[in-house]
Image (spheres, coloured by chain):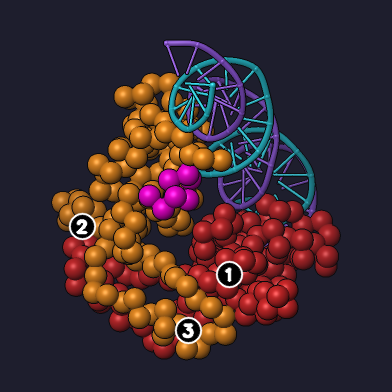
Chain colours: A orange, B red, C cyan, D purple
Amino acid sequence: MAIKYSKQRAVIKEFLQDRKDHPTADVVYTNVRKAYPNISLGTVYRNLMLLSDMGEIQRLRVGDGSDHFDPNTREHNHFVCRQCGDVLDLEMDDISGIDQTAAKSFRGKIDGHRIYFYGICEKCLQAEQQNQ
Amino acid sequence: MAIKYSKQRAVIKEFLQDRKDHPTADVVYTNVRKAYPNISLGTVYRNLMLLSDMGEIQRLRVGDGSDHFDPNTREHNHFVCRQCGDVLDLEMDDISGIDQTAAKSFRGKIDGHRIYFYGICEKCLQAEQQNQ
DNA sequence: TTAAATATAGTAATCGTTATCGTTATTGAT
DNA sequence: ATCAATAACGATAACGATTACTATATTTAA
């Protein structure tokens, strides 16, 4: 099961690299389709999974019903807007110590975590002010 | 749209209270069915959502494909076992300050977060040792 | 006790994702 | 360059979790 090159996979990865948001499979599909009209949704899913498994991208399950994909595999946190649903990067002071903090009171092996912050994003806050 | 009492909702809530794990809708359904054989899956879903909306229970989207429900609405964190998929409570030192830490470098309004720790639970660790 | 409103069971529909399958593309060896 | 193997493709069906629909039953306040 050696991995072979595919143009489709290259295009999908390239598209992801250029986005600062964290698109869902469907968004990747509709966009990649513009340059590559007969790519199939299954191919998009298969490659997003493959890229995640290879550690070249990150799959985010933010809890809004569909998976989001992040080309940045560095450990970092995310913010989810309750209004528009956008998923944004959230750079912050290092809190990697929380795994140890958690381990203190837990009788299993902790090897990682995911944090999702929720609230209203800058864009929605501004729109809110305009409508008042 | 006032909320009316329903025996089904009471039974669902009661069942949840008695569980220390965090069952999915389907688990709630198959169990509640034993005492209440003709309850419908739709009713279980509707009431779990309703109870979440009313703030009487918590919906957890841990990223394993189905929602889990927690009768404990207090703010606390969770652990997800990579092996058996169990979702466990994880009591730990207060880290509620992370919302402020996150806010420092973010230009939106943060009003909460969810943290999921991942790893191998105690039960699976023990089973692992037995098989060696 | 009755009428309005809400909840139910049963079932169909929807949505995101995964699996299947016959065809096409990549790759390493000739 | 040609070939055979094998991985990837596009199209579409299947799947699992959740939501929507509808006719009937239950709750509730007057």
Q: Which residues are magenta?
A: A49-56
Question: How busy is the neighbourhood of tag 3: few (under 14 within 10 Å), some, or many (20 plus)?
Answer: some
Task: Estimate the spatial distance between the alpha carbons at disc 1 and disc 2, rounded to whole Å.
Answer: 35 Å
Q: Quadrant of residue B32?
A: bottom right
Residue A103's disc number: 3
Question: What residue does disc 2 label?
Answer: A122
- For residue A59, side relative to residue B69 (left or right): left
Query: In the rendered view, would you say A55 is above or below A26?
Result: below
Q: Name the chain under label 3.
A: A
Magenta stretch: includes residue A19: no
The amino acid type, in three-letter code, at marker 2 is Glu
Residue A43, image x, y percentages? 48, 33
Question: Relative to B21, is A19 above or below?
Answer: above
Q: Amino acid at mark 1?
A: Cys
**Rendered location of residue A82, percent (x, y):** 35, 57
- Give the camera-side residue of B132 and A9: B132
Share a chain, discs 1 and 3? no
- Of marks 1 and 2, the one in the foreground: 1
Q: In terms of sequence position, does the residue under pointer 2 or pointer 3 come before the other?
A: 3
**Does residue A132 appear left or right of residue A99 in this picture?**
left
Residue at x 57% of width, y 54% of height: B65
Name the quarter where the C terminus of chain B is drawn.
bottom right
> Picture quarter containing residue B75?
bottom left
